[in-house]
Image (cartoon, rainbow, N blue to C red):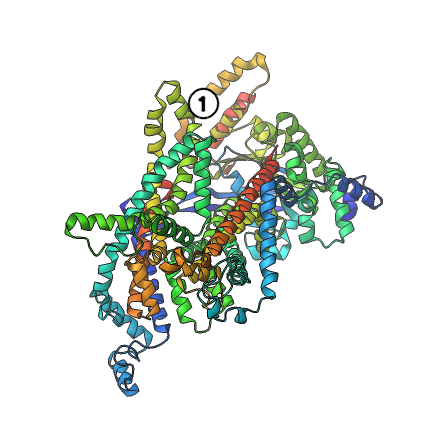
Amino acid sequence: MSLIEIKDLKVHYPIRSGFWNRVTDSVKAVDGITFNIEAGETYGLVGESGSGKSTTGKSVVGLEKVTSGSILYQGKDITQRRNRQLLDYNRDVQMIFQDSLSSLNPRKRIEDIIAEPLRNFEHLTKDQEKLRVLQLLDIVGLDADALYKYPHQFSGGQRQRIGVARAVATNPKLIIADEPVSALDLSVQAQVLNFMKKIQRDFGISYLFISHDLGVVRHMCTNIAIMNRGRLVEVGTRDDIYNHPLHIYTKRLLAAIPDVNVSERAAHRAMRQKVEQIYQSNRHDYYDDTGEAYPLVQVSPTHSVALPPELAHQLLAQESEAQD
Amino acid sequence: MAENFAQHSNISAADLDRLTREAQAEATPSTARIIWNEFKADRPALISLFVVVGFILFVMVGALFIDTPKMMETNIVNYFNRPLTAGFPLGADAGGRSILLELIVGSRNSIGIALGLTVISSTFGICWGLISGYFSGYVDWGMQRVYDFMMMLPMTMMIIVLVTIIPHYNAVTLTLIFSIFYWEGTSRLIRSRTLAESGKDYAAASLTSGTNRWKIIFRDIMPNISSLIIVDTTLSFAENIGVETGLSYLGFGLPSQTPSLGTMIANANDPNNITQYWWTWLPAALEIIILCLAISYIGQVLRRAADASQRQGTAD
Amino acid sequence: MWKTILRRLLIMIPEVIILSILVFLLAKAMPGDPFTGSINPKADPEQIHHLMKLNGLYDPWYQQYWHWVVHLFHGNLGNSYQYQEPVSRLIAGRAGNTLWLALFTMILTYAMALPMGVFAGRHEGQLPDTVIRVYTYVTYCIPFFVILVIGIWVFGYILGWFPTTGSISPNANGWAQTIGSHLTHILLPGLLGALFGTVNIVQYLRSEVIDAKHSDYVRTAQSKGVPSKDIYRHHIFRNSLLPIAAFAGYSITGLLNGSIFTETVFSYPGMGLLFVNSIIYRDYTVITALVLIYGILNLLGTLLSDIILSLVDPRIRID
C-alpha cells in the first residue's frame, strides 16, 4: 500500500459575480489529479507558477479546503478535518514553506518555533523537549546558541534549516516541500538540498517535492508528475520524464532548462526552437477543444501521459525510433 | 523515537545545561524590551509618561482623602471665591465649593471612566478584529455587517438616549454604555492587520504543527500586531477622556452631585461664568488639554519606537 | 457601477429597518408615558388609561411599531409635546440651520485643508510643515467640545469678534442684513468645526504629496522641465482629489455628531440643540425622529463616500 493515495483531487475556487453575487464560475486550481506517494521516496511535482502544484501540496497537508476527491492516509480520507484530528495527521505529515522568513513567526524564539509541533503532538518534559530541540538544531547544522534568537537574525539558508528542523521534529513520514529552495541563492540551494537528502536517509522520510525547477527536481526525485493548469499532463520515473518526454508541455519545460555547456549552445537553441514550433503548430493535438489537458493514458508500467491514446502510442513509437 | 534523534545527533542529555547556558548568553532581547529602550531614549516622552502616571496616581490617591458629599455641599459664604484666597487655592464655584477639591475628585472620576472605557472597548475591539480578520468567509461577513450597522448609529444620540432610559446609572453602567459604541475604530484597524498577518505562512505552519485556531489567533497573530495594539490603546485612551467629559458637559454623563471634568467645564455654559468667573471652568479645560496632549505624545513616541523595533525585526 | 450603487442601496434596507425597530423600542423603554404631562398634570388616571387605550399604547409592540411605520410613510412623525406642533414641521424648521452650518463647515474645511496639506507635503521637514503638523496633532488630541468652549471664550467673549448665541440677530432687516447676520453667526462655529475637520484631510494629503514627490512619474516630469507649480497642480494634486472628496461623505457622521456639541455651546437653534432640549423635556416623538434622521444621514454619507471611492479604484467596489 502506498503511503498516501490522492484520488481525483479537485480544488475549485468560486467566482462570484452578477447582481446577486451568486457563484457563476470557478477557478479550477486543481482539477482532478491522481497519484500515489510511496514510503521513503521523493515524489516531484513540477509545473509553472499558477499550475496548481502548491494548492495540491497544501491540500495534502490539510491547509486547503478540498472541493472533491480524496486523499487516503492509513485507509482514512484526510480531506475531512475529523479524520485528520483522529489520526494526529500532521504529526506524520509536515510542510516546509517556500518563504522561510514568512513561515517563521517573527515574534517567537527559535526554541518555541521548533518545539511547537512537539508541544502539540508529544508530551515531553521541559528537559526532554529542550534536548530534542537542541538535537534538531544539531541535525540541521545550527549551533545551540540559536535557541533564544529570533528568525530575523538568521540568513535565508539558516532559516530554511530551522523550517526543516520544525518539520522533522515529530519524526514525520511525509514532508511537503513547497519550493523549499527557490528563494535561496544557488550556492545555498545545493547545501539545503543535500542535507534534506541526508535527513531523508537518516529518518526514512518521504518528500512531496514541489518545484518549477526541473534541474533541482532531477537531483532530488525518483518519480515525477508534471502539472499544467490544474491537471497532470505526464507522470513517470525520472528516466521517463527526462529521457522520453511525450507531452509537448514537458518537452517545453525541459527545453527551458538552461544549458551550462557553452559549446552546445547553438544545438540547444535549435532544439528549443523546434519544440516551440511543434507547440505552436500542433497545440490542438495536445489539448482538447476547450484547451484542457486530456485524461492520462498509460504507455508503460511507469509512464503515463495526458494525450489521446492513438497520439500517445504514435509519439511513443517515434520516440523509440529516434532512440534506435 | 527519541533514540532516532539521539542517533543522528552528537548532543545528549549531559550537554543540556551547558548548551542552555551558552544559548542564554546569546539570547536576543524581546520586542517589548526593544520598544522600551527606544522609548526611554526620548526624554520628553519619558517625562510625559512620568507626569501622566504621577498625576493619575495623585488624583486616585488624593480623592480617597476627600469627603465628596461634604465637599459638594453648598456653602453660600464662599460664593465665587476668587483663586488664591484662604482655603481656596483655585477659588470656589457658585455653590461655594472648592474648585481644587472638585478638580481632584472630578479628575479621578473622569480618568477612571476613560481607563475603564479604554480597557473594555479596546479588549472587545481587538478580539472582534482578530476573529473577523482570521476567520474570513461567513463569520467575517456577518461581523462586518454588525460593524457597518454600529457605524451608522448616531453615537452621541444613542448614548444620551440610553442614559435617560437606565433609571439608576453610575460610573460603571456609564462606562459600559460608552463601551458599546467605542470599539469600532479599534476593530477595523486590527481586522485589516490581522487579514495581512493570517495570510502569512507562519500562521499556516502553526496550523500544520497542530496548534488550534484560537491559540493561533491569540498566541501567534496577536503578538505580531502587539505594537499596533499598544499604540492604538494609548491613543484611544487620550480620545476616551473626551467621551465622558463631553457627555457630562452636555449634562448626560455623571450625575450633577458627582464631580467630573465635564460638569466643571459645563460651568462655562453660563455667560457670566465664562468671562467673570473663569476659574470655575478653565482649570478643568486646561487639565483635559494637557492630559490629552501628553498621552497622545506618549502614543506617538510609542509608535515611533514600535516602528523602529519593526525595522529591526525585518532587517536582513 | 450602477450595480454597485443599487446593491449598496439594497444592503441599506435591512439596516434602516433594524435601526427603526431599535429606535422605536428605545423610545418605548423611556420612562413615563406621553400623556401624563401633556394634558393636565392633575389628569385623572382613568382618563389617561382611556387615552392610552385609544392611541393603541397597550397593543403588542410589533403592532404599535407597524402603526408607527405606516405613519412615517405618510410623513407623519407625530406631535411634539413640548412645542405642541407636528414633529415634521418642527424639525423642518431646525434642519435648515444644521445643514447650512454643516455645509459651511465642510466648505471651510476643504478651503483650509487643501492648501495646508499640499504645502506641508511640499515643504516636508521644513518649518511650515512642522507648524502644520503640530497644529493637526494638537487639534486632533483635544476633545471637540473643549475646542468649542475655549473658542467661544476667546473669540466670542474676550475679543468679542463673533456673536455667541443664536443663528440670526433679532435686529436684522432686509435680505442683505439677514444673510449677513446668518453668516456672522455661523462663522465661529464653522471655523472651529473646520479646525477639527481638517486634521484627516491634511494628514492624508501631506503623505500623498510626499509619496508622489518621490515617485517615478513626478521625477520624469521634473526631468522634462515641467515647472514645479504645474507638477503639483496637475500631477500630484489631481490624483489625490477623488479620495479626498470621499472624505466628505465620511465626515458627515462627524459633523452630525459634532452638531450636538456645537449647537449647545453656541445656543444655535438646529437639530442638535433640539435633541438636547427634547431629552431634557422627555419629548419622545422628537427624539425618535431625530435619531432616525441622523442614522439615515450617516448611512447616506457612507454610501456617498463608498461610491466615490469605487469610482477611484474599482478594486474597492463593495461586493
Number of numbered labels in the structure image: 1
Q: Chain of mark 1?
A: A
Asked if residue A136 can be seen in this view, the reply is yes
Judging by the rendered image, the residue that carries numbered circle 1 is A276
Asked if residue C306 can be seen in this view, the reply is no
Which residue, as the protein is rendered here, is positioned at the far right?
A: B14
Q: Position of residue C138 (x, y in %)?
A: 46, 44
Is residue C268 placed above or below A191 in the rendered structure? below
Q: Does residue B189 appear left or right of residue B217 in this picture? A: left
Which residue, as the protein is rendered here, is positioned at the far left?
A: C174
Which residue, as the protein is rendered here, is positioned at the far top?
A: A263
Of A240 and C34, which appears nearest the observer? C34
Is residue B35 placed above or below C254 in the rendered structure? above
Q: Position of residue B7 (x, y in %)?
A: 80, 42
Circle 1 Cα neighbour tier, 10 Å, few/some/many (<14 / 14–19 / ≥20): some
- The residue positioned 29% from the left and 74% from the top of the image is C64
Q: Position of residue B123 (x, y in %)?
A: 54, 57
Q: Position of residue C243 (x, y in %)?
A: 35, 40
- The residue positioned 47% from the left and 28% from the top of the image is A248
Of C69 and B201, which appears nearest the observer? C69
Of B187 and B139, which appears nearest the observer? B187
Secondary structure state at the residue bearing disc 1:
helix
Q: Does residue A131 appear left or right of residue A268 in this picture? A: right
Amino acid beneath label 1: Glu
Give the quadrant of residue B25: top right
The quarter of the rendered structure image containing the C terminus of chain A is top right
